[in-house]
Amino acid sequence: MVTVANAADPSRSLHGLDVRGSSLYFVTYTHTGAGGVSLKDATLYALDLQGASPPVTLASGLDNIQSQPGALLADASHVYLVLDNYTDWTIVRVPVAGGAVETVARGETRIMAFGLGADYVAWVEEGAPAGAYDRPNGSLRLVAKP
């Protein structure tokens, strides 16, 4: 067993990960604000599990001040992330070799989970608008990959 504590920077927290082939994708961030509830400087990394080090930065600035990288999934060409700043819910993707952050879809309410197919991105949204506490139903949404 190998422990990859925080291979990028031990002063930062880890958030989200996925393994695809021999690559481990993960996000690090720093806490700010009262109680450490806000995030800043969110950065997406790739780590070659077959020995290459250090981790490679694929994208930075994912937090967009308040957005928080949530779920993280990878396919053969991109790493997909959910950004959530409590009023705007967005699925974005970054090429596995690094590059520009591209918006794939925007949720109408909080994105609770998402998945990848060969040609599609699917996600589940809360049933009630932001700020409502009764969520009697939700919706399953689907969009073709760009």
Image: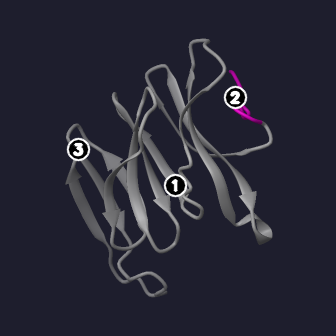
The numbered disc on residue 146 is 3
- In 3D space, how far apart are the residues under numbered discs 1 and 2 (Cα atoms)? 20 Å
As for residue 55 lying within the magenta part, the answer is no
Q: Amino acid at mark 3?
A: Pro
Q: Amino acid at mark 2?
A: Val
Q: Earlier in the sequence, mark 2 or mark 3?
A: 2
Q: Is residue 43 above or below residue 23?
A: below
Q: Give the mark count.
A: 3
**At which x and y percent is residue 15?**
61, 48
The numbered disc on residue 70 is 1
- The segment highlighted magenta reads 1-9
- Residue denoted by label 2: 4
Callout 1 crowding tier (Cα within 10 Å): few <14, some 14–19, many ≥20: many
Q: Is residue 40 above or below residue 33?
A: above
Q: Quadrant of the C terminus?
A: top left
Image point (34%, 29%), residue name: 77
